[in-house]
Amino acid sequence: MDANNECRWFLRPGVWFWCAIALGAFIRFYLVVFTAGTRDVEIWEQHARDVQTSGLIGYYHGDPFANHPPFISQDESVLLRISDASGIPFRILLRAPFALVDLGTTFLLLLLLGKSHWRFVAAAAYWLNPLSIIFSAYHGNTDSAIAFFLLLCIWLLSKEKLLGAAVALGVSLWIKLPGLLAIPALLFFISNWRKRLLFLFIAGLTALSTYLPALIQDAKIVYANVFGYRGLYIYTPGGVPVWGPIRVLVFSIIAPPGQWSEQSRGVFLFLWQQAWHITLALLLLLTWLRRSQPTANAVCATIGMLYTIVYGFSESFAFQYFAWVLPFWLFLNPWFCVAAVILASGYVYSLYWFLCGNPWLLGKWDFAGHAYWPPVVIGFRNLAMLFFFISGCVFLVSAIWRELAPRPKPKRAL
């Protein structure tokens, strides 16, 4: 028995686990301290300086791309003051907190996977995932916090701590709004409507506490910039799209717009314009079809599927949006998880390598200066886009099939 347990090294956090944690921490430290990050770092620094000089409302009025919630906008302004006073580069202060948040995400995975024999392997795999490393410690944006707060919310709900879970969800909305997409799935995890309404009330009150001062000053501009933001259609100067089922799967892989008939172009244009509404409808449909999945792990799987649909069907997309869902992939089929990590990591890392000019991500991340991408980057982009589109379709069809499948009739008692 002892020999058998020794062979099952993955059952406990041995030397291998702590070496993985140390390696992930070292890589994150290197990226935070020694690299410049993407263009988002410069954008955030400018946003923070605009908040200092113009005030929060003036910042929203002066920059149409000022789409971050009031709390995080003012918080980054404070970090800029600390940077100016201490001499510590803003790029370090911006990214270091989210690298630490990623450690919290890893710990939450251990808690949520507590009954799985592979929980330590899964947590180490997340901690060493190239995407989680890049988005938390290199890229320079706040998206890694979304996954942390959603996992924290689910774990607290699994412990029947409704108040704490609602606060966790509300705090996530202080930083960014994509956590809203998971709310329907979270509601079905709660046992009755009284608790669901209480959960929504507390979460809303928590979120509103940091929005209210700005809303009182100018509700219209806050709604337009923050709540009205729907992402961007990002292209290189040469017209290369970074993502999108129409722009990549149809116009880049199959044929450019000029080779389609006028009627076909009209259909694709309609789908492009309505992509966000179509995506939201599909999210609600999938959530409803999986409403009878009552466990914490099943809810995590549902959220993983929901964001897969976002990636597969939405035309507005930025690289760091993958950070919303990375830990939730571990609750899905292992083959999906492995394929998603390989394809998405291959796309993001090969592109960042190309834009920086070296595999260590040193130097300036120059998106505007690279109008055209090499075949390896385009190949990874196309495969990743196709994979998430097909996976989203599979998740939807499978959920519909299970809903329509006849259920066995209960046996009569003798």
Image (cartoon, rainbow, N blue to C red):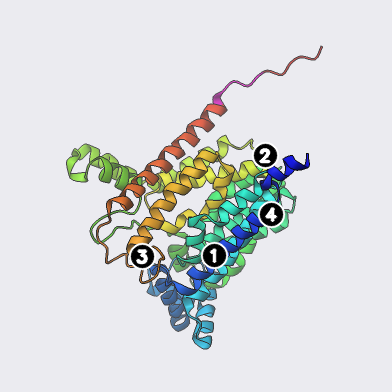
Task: Mark 3: give few (<14), some (14-19) or many (20+) Cα within 10 Å.
Answer: few
Q: Amino acid at mark 4?
A: Gly
Which SS class for mark 2?
loop
Q: Is residue 110 above or below residue 222?
A: above
Q: Earlier in the sequence, mark 3 or mark 4?
A: 4
Q: Quickly name the residue at label 4.
A: 14
Check if mark 4's residue and mark 2's residue have beta carbons within 8 Å: no
Q: Earlier in the sequence, mark 2 or mark 1?
A: 1
Q: Is residue 262 above or below residue 64?
A: above
Q: Residue at x 32, y 67 (%)?
A: 366
Q: Which residues are magenta?
A: 404-408
Q: Residue at x 35, y 51 (%)?
A: 243
Q: Quickly name the residue at label 1.
A: 175
Q: Which mark is residue 281?
A: none
Q: Earlier in the sequence, mark 4 or mark 2?
A: 4
Check if mark 2's residue and mark 3's residue have beta carbons within 8 Å: no
Q: Residue at x 41, y 65 (%)?
A: 360
State yes or no: residue 352 in magenta: no
Between the C-alphas of marks 3 and 1, the distance is 32 Å
Q: Is residue 408 above or below residue 227?
A: above
Q: Quickly name the residue at label 3.
A: 358
Which SS class for mark 1?
helix
